[in-house]
Image (spheres, helix red, strand yellow):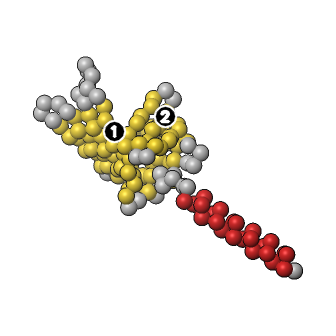
Amino acid sequence: MKKKFYSIFFSLIFFCCWKLDASENINPIIGTWVFEYMATTYYSDPQETDTVDKNDNYSETLIFTADGKFNYKGNSAGETDQGHGSWSVNENQLTTIIGSEKTIGKYTIIDENLTITTQEEETDEYFATKSVVVYQKK
């Protein structure tokens, strides 16, 4: 009887410790995120900033899964866009890949808000930009 008790006892301890360890390794970006707003600064002369709110006929939902994949679905000015890709993080840097398009940005998660900041260098056709997009955890 003692052997059976110790076997069950140690199995429960192992299971509880494993569950605690597994939950600590879950990346907080995993889950469903709903668009709140975006601010894009154009480094032109003069500098301009354009903002888009979720109420401006724009919506987007991102779903990050634990296996490094994500889905997105959105609506902008009546046009629907959806797709999927892969994601990875390294410290505060988020990398997403959709087909051959790779985007790298800094991200933070504070109080159930995901903020992604990306920057684009100036080219012959476009001014340099900085975009800040905020999502709310669903």
Left or right: where 38 falls relative to 27: left
Question: Mark 2, residues whose alpha carbon is within 10 Å: few (<14), some, or many (≥20)?
Answer: some
Q: Is residue 128 visible?
A: yes
Question: For the image shown, how many numbered marks are present on the structure?
Answer: 2
Q: Which picture quadrant has residue 39?
A: top left
SS of the residue under disc 2:
strand
Q: Is residue 32 visible?
A: no
Q: Position of residue 53 (x, y in %)?
A: 30, 49
Q: Which residue is mark 1?
A: 118
Foreground of the two, 43 or 1: 1
Q: Quarter of the image containing the N terminus?
A: bottom right
Question: Mark 1, residues whose alpha carbon is within 10 Å: few (<14), some, or many (≥20)?
Answer: some
Q: Is residue 62 above or below residue 21?
A: above
Left or right: where 77 falls relative to 127: right
Residue visible at 80% across and 71% down in the picture: 7
Q: Which comes before the other along the chain, label 1 or label 2?
A: 2
Residue visible at 22% across and 34% down in the picture: 42
Left or right: where 62 falls relative to 18: left
Q: Position of residue 98 (x, y in %)?
A: 49, 33
Spatial distance from mark 1 to mark 2, Cα to Cα? 14 Å
SS of the residue under disc 1:
strand
Left or right: where 26 falls relative to 117: right
* Amino acid type for the residue under numbered disc 2: Ile
Q: Which mark is residue 97?
A: 2
Foreground of the two, 94 or 2: 2
Residue visible at 49% across and 34% down in the picture: 97
Q: Position of residue 77 (x, y in %)?
A: 35, 40
Foreground of the two, 66 or 33: 66
What residue occupies the far left of the structure in this picture? 46
* Amino acid type for the residue under numbered disc 1: Thr
